[in-house]
Amino acid sequence: MEMKTIKLSYLAYLGGLTLLWLVSTPLDFTNVKFFTFRNMMLDYTGIIGMGVMSLGMILALRLPILESLLKGLDKSYRLHKWLGITGLVLSLVHYLWANVPKWLVGFGILDKPVRTKPPLESSAILQFFQNQRELAESIGEWAFYGAVLFMVLALVKWFPYRFFFKTHRFISICYLLLVFHSLVLLNFSHWGELLGPMMAMLMAGGSLGAIYSLFNLNGRGKQTSATIEHLQYFEDSKVLRVVLKAQGHWSGHKTGQFSFLTFDKAEGPHPFTIASNWQNDGHLEFLIKELGDYTKTLPKTLEVGQQVDVEGPYGRFDFNSGKERQIWIAGGIGITPFLSRMQDLSNGNRGDKVDLFYCVPSTDSVLTESITDIAETADVNLHLISAEKDGKLDRDTICGLAPDWKNADIWFCGPALFADSLKHELAKVGFSDSRFHQELFEMR
Ligand SMILES: Cc1cc2nc3c(=O)[nH]c(=O)nc-3n(C[C@H](O)[C@H](O)[C@H](O)COP(=O)(O)OP(=O)(O)OC[C@H]3O[C@@H](n4cnc5c(N)ncnc54)[C@H](O)[C@@H]3O)c2cc1C
């Protein structure tokens, strides 16, 4: 469901901008000269490229309204990523349209177009823009090289997250330079159409996002400090339980939401689901699995009493689909949002009939035992699926153990590939995608 929202938003945005460009551009395909077509393509790729980058920058602001519209910050970041990839492709195509014809003229393959000096614009602003064209072109070229570098580093997974996190914000500088490039070089005629003011608004929003990212101001209003009150290490599961007590203001959270935790400023924030429900006492609990280089160090480095920066809450994995009958599926550490919900159910907020499929490597761990107890108290029907004994959870097991699955919504938290294969199998028996709610544990 949520993935559909992102896909539709992405397509609607690209379609909308293209439509605006089409109505603002006189298209006359009789007797089209190569360089006229090239200039048209330069205009189109420039506008759509800046349009997607601007929305990407606006999304980086983490505005609550956009988070609600896109059904969670994890989804909003996914859209940000797709917009970034589209921006990368379009700026490359734009660069090629700008330069390949010049290279072909240089090689004598194409004839140099006859240039007539454009008449001096009447308004002082347009005259200023006219005089800045050369500067804007060369700034655009250098900003393009920088943007490509930082976008590629964002997409290449072997580039460690912590370095990605530190370098990614420099893309903002490239973006601001590209705003200058676009303002100067935007076809003057667009300013009299809807497209010009629309692009100006997008670039203003994008510039704000860029400045916020550059100075690390995103999410400032949602930050507070906390101290570590309790630590418990589940050695056999390689999971660390961290209980925090908020020192500053924390206005509470819904079950299933997550926050960014900064244990070490040099490392920066990492997202973790809040595994406890909000009891108005400042306590926030997390279960952190050793999934990578940094999380592996936490059991040895964290100490009770240590200060932690908390930012959030974010996310819309809130179990509110209006359906009373729910099936939950947790893959490994993907159990965390369900733990928070089960605490809620144990505290009297009952009403839902729930089956929880919890997929674990093996069932005999201390953590699994404690989760079994929590499920019992919450009156949740727990099915432990051990990879060792039962293999991978599949559609038939779900439908067999929860026979009224047709009336249920599915809430899933676990590896993306696992979700994709289940969705695919469930679609074959008529289970609609709109009833499959998924938390994305990957931001990049
Ligand atoms: C919305 C959300 C909720 C999550 N909830 C939990 C949870 O409750 N418990 C839990 O154990 N894990 C959770 N994770 C995953 C957790 O954030 C990563 O496992 C952790 O950040 C990995 O850090 P690392 O440096 O040890 O791993 P790496 O080896 O650097 O990376 C492993 C994976 O984590 C990603 N990652 C690394 N650093 C970050 C970061 N700062 N921000 C975002 N992603 C990062 C990488 O892209 C990679 O996919 C959640 C992730 C998201 C997006």
Image (spheres, rainbow, N blue to C red):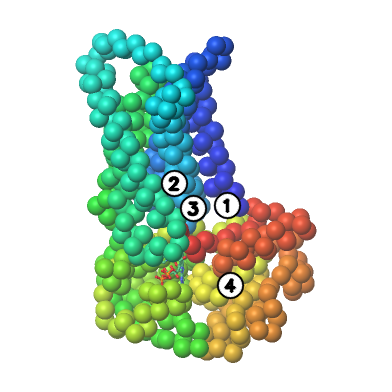
Q: Residue at x 29, y 50 (%)?
A: 170
Asked whether 93 or 210 is in front, the reply is 93
**Of the image marks 3 and 4, the number of the one nearer the N terminus:** 3
| Residue 235, percent from left and from top | 46, 88
* Labelled disc at residue 84: 2
| Residue 49, percent from left and from top | 43, 36
Q: Which residue is mark 4?
A: 331
Work out how far the residue at label 2 is from the one at label 3, CA to CA, in angstroms. Answer: 10 Å
Work out how far the residue at label 3 is from the one at label 4, CA to CA, in angstroms. Answer: 20 Å
Callout 1–callout 3 Cβ contact below 8 Å: yes
Q: Amino acid at mark 4?
A: Gly
Instruction: Determine crowd level at label 3: few under 14, some 14-19, many 20+ residues with C-alpha closer than 10 A.
Output: some
Callout 1–callout 4 Cβ contact below 8 Å: no
Q: Which of the two discs, 2 and 4, sits closer to the camera?
A: 2
Q: Which residue is mark 1?
A: 3
Ligand 1 shown in quarter? bottom left
Can you see residue 287? no
